[in-house]
Amino acid sequence: MNLQWYPGHMTKARRAMQEDLRLIDVVIELVDARVPVSSKNPDIEEMVKNKSRILLLNKSDMADSEITGQWISFYEKKGYLALAVDARKKNNLKQVNEKIQQACRAKIERDRKRGIKNRPVRAMIVGIPNVGKSTFINSFAGRACAKTGNRPGVTRGRQWIRLNRQVELLDTPGILWPKFEDPVVGQHLAMIGSIKDELVQSVELGLILIEFLTESCPGVLNDKYSVAETSDSAEILRQIAQNRGCVRKGNEPDYEKAAFLLLDDFRNARLGRITIEKP
Ligand code: G4P
């Protein structure tokens, strides 16, 4: 499976973001807690190296909480301020605010020494498509103000949302691109549904998912679809098709339909909270 993502737009997006970054004190980077490596753009390291940074492991409601905890320790050891969140809920916001204050402590102190009081810190959300940037901005800002839609970079007319006395947020997130050089990255992003299904061969992806689940989460497929978890992924997919009535004319198993069903269940956490990438 070989996937590409608007490589032509990258340079433009990168330039636009670099411009926006000049205005920012703290970068809040969102990744998907189920695939924290594949959903993280490595170029961002270079782009924001002089900024305060916060890493939010979003969609943590769908990830294995123990592994998310391991990821937080992993990133904290690397010097990040990291936090697990569910962008749809407002109950993480206090913690996020605390992290922002923590991240900007040095700047606030510098301002204070120069006699500047109460200048809010300016924050910007960044991340690859579908990690929950717009959802987070909407929850964080408390009103429907984030424009949705996946455009790389940031629109020109900059708008700041005053979150509280201490923080202002750029209303439009910075959209990064995933790094597809390693085909596994594409597979993982496709598994969580972050790549359009037209680009992805569902049967192939379904088989990869079955292989992952039988190895890493034994029992899950048996519980959900009453299949025998053999080492033959195609046989498991055949059994899913059979047990779920995915059949073509002539009573042939409809592998594509069964793969869609499996992927849809996985993406919507109906197979439980499962993290694909481990530290
Ligand atoms: P983006 O701006 O980074 O591209 O992502 P966006 O906020 O549009 O979110 C992408 C999808 O992920 C949305 O679902 C959104 O509801 C969902 N989402 C965001 N954060 C979380 C989270 O923490 N947990 C869970 N479970 N889902 C989250 P959608 O199906 O595309 O849209 P809709 O059904 O919500 O309308």
Image (tube, rainbow, N blue to C red):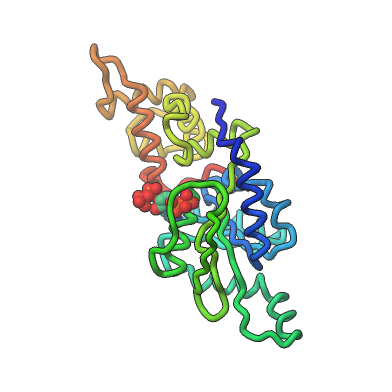
Residue closer to the observer: 178 or 79: 178
Judge from the rendering whether residue 144 lies leftward or rightward of residue 276; answer left or right: left
Judge from the rendering whether residue 71 lies leftward or rightward of residue 244; answer left or right: right
The N terminus, quarter of image: top right
Residue closer to the observer: 278 or 136: 136
Residue closer to the observer: 220 or 212: 212
Judge from the rendering whether residue 273 lies leftward or rightward of residue 245; answer left or right: right
**Is residue 99 in sight in this rendering?**
yes
Extreme-top residue of the structure? 250
Residue under the point 62% across and 44% down: 12
Q: In the rendered view, would you say 208 is above or below 146?
A: above
Q: In the rendered view, would you say 239 is above or below 217?
A: above
Which picture quadrant has residue 86? bottom left
Q: Position of residue 237 (x, y in %)?
A: 39, 25
Residue under the point 25% across and 26% down: 245
Q: Position of residue 225 (x, y in %)?
A: 33, 34
Q: In the rendered view, would you say 235 is above or below 59?
A: above
Q: Position of residue 56 (x, y in %)?
A: 56, 59
Q: In the rendered view, would you say 95 is above or below 233?
A: below
